Amino acid sequence: MEVNVPTTNGYLADKFGKYAPEADKHAGTPTRSFPIEIKDAPSQTQTFALWLIDYDAVPVSGFPWIHWTAANIPAGTTVIPENASHDGSLSMIQGHNSTAGRIVGNTDPLTVTGYVGPQPPNADHAYTLTVFALDSALTLADGYWLSELRHAMAGHVLAECTVDLWSRR
């Protein structure tokens, strides 16, 4: 399986992160998700799942920062469109990101679930996108946590592909 995201020299376009125009933010938080192309998924794929995690956040926050989790993306999907996390253009269920956790305590329904873009505070960060081809739909509801997604996927992963996407400080 292959996953492609448009970048310039490995960096996401500004509109997907910290330097997004106000039209692509909600309450100062970037919310326009980037497009993802999926190729050569196994023929037995029933759904896709993904997560976007900033492991470079550990020195800043003390833990990897979850920017996006999504599951039950239909098997025939070859492109997850730009802004699909928030515009409803693609059927999927989405989990909480790190802003919903107790440390941040965000309660805004438009930013606690789904994509929130990179905002590296200390240096350029690599954001790790992993897309999974699964042999079934998962029994999760919107607002699940990453740990629930991991457990639900256990024994159902047919293939996975990981790509690091950079965002500038």
Image: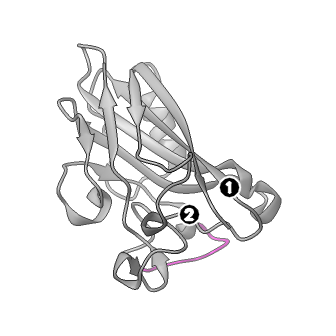
Nearer to us in this view, 99 or 42: 42
Extent of the magenta region: 101-108
Instruction: Please say if the residues under marks 2 and 1 sit with CB atoms less than 8 Å apart.
Output: yes
Looking at the image, residue 73 sits to the left or right of residue 5; the answer is left
Residue ID at (19%, 49%): 91
| Residue on which the image places disc 1 | 125
Quadrant containing the C terminus is bottom right
Q: Is residue 3 above or below residue 115?
A: above
Question: The disc labelled 2 sits on which kind of residue?
Answer: Pro
Q: CA distance from mark 2 to mark 1?
A: 8 Å
Q: Is residue 135 magenta?
A: no
Nearer to us in this view, 97 or 23: 23
Residue ID at (40%, 36%): 4
Q: Is residue 104 above or below residue 91?
A: below
Q: Is residue 152 above or below residue 32?
A: above
Question: The disc labelled 1 sits on which kind of residue?
Answer: His
